Amino acid sequence: MAATAVMESIAMMIMSFLAGFIFFYFMSSQEKTVKKQQISVLISLLIDFVIYIWVGKIIVHMDIFFTDPIAVLAIPGNSQAFYLAVLFILIHIFFQTKRGQLEPLKVMEVFFYTFFSASFVYEFLQLTWNDDTYTWPYLSLLFVLLSGMVALHDRMRSMRLMPIIVFIWSMGQFLFAINRPFTTVFGYSMDWWFFLMIAMATLIAEVINRKERVKS
């Protein structure tokens, strides 16, 4: 039964990100070869992220790892492992950028479109496949954000649209986290401070970017 649930979750995740890649492909104004390259880079980073979640699980369950290493890998990932994976992938991206192996703005663009569309599909599958009505508020938020992304796509550059959407999403999730028993991202239960940090980081980055644009 547990194995079936895991396989269903993996299947939903794969379908969600496939839909996300398709959404990005049609939304992006880049050349086909560039879009394919961006998708390839994101797939590589997603694989790295999954590996970092496993590493995070080992760190969180270090006591079990020393006695039964295989058992740790069988334990479902939790929010602590997810937070560690986020930290590790950010460090990973930082060093790849410093070495000139990665263009962060292009990664941000493909991640932006893929993440929100994949999140919507994942939550929709949770509702229809697992009859999870708890997801309605988050699904509604994602629907509004995706509608805004499509409506403003031809009116605003991606780099201007991204901080607005990310800020609204993070504040929406923050409000869900403090007013509901829990809120999730791809099945991982997240704490309120995680979303607040994203909102603050987005706001600070946008203020800095605007100051730089004014100077130039």
Image (tube, rainbow, N blue to C red):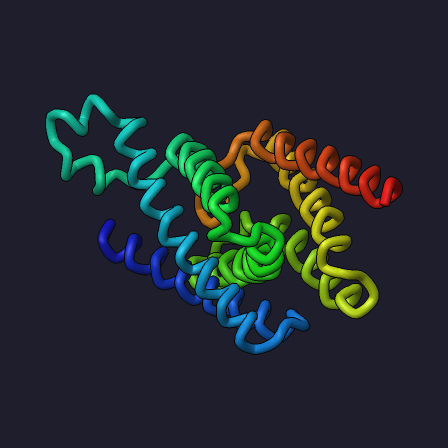
Image coords of residue 182 (percent x, y): 53, 35
* Residue 71 x, y percent position in the rendering: 16, 37
Name, please, the residue furthest toward the right: 214
Q: Quadrant of residue 215?
A: top right
Q: In the image, is residue 163 above or below residue 124?
A: above
Tell me the residue at 77%/36% (across/down). Answer: 208
Q: Position of residue 164 (x, y in %)?
A: 75, 48
Q: Residue furthest top?
A: 63
Query: In the depicted view, which residue is nearer to us: 131 or 22?
Result: 22
As drawn, 49 above or below 69: below
Instruction: Identify whether 187 is placed above or below 116.
Output: above
- Going 51% across and 35% down the picture, which residue do you hit? 190
Q: Residue at x 75, y 66 (%)?
A: 153
Residue 179 % position (x, y) = 64, 32
Above or below for 147 versus 180: below
Residue lying at the far bottom of the rendered structure = 32
Left or right, 150 with respect to 94, comes to right
Quarter of the image where one finds residue 82:
top left
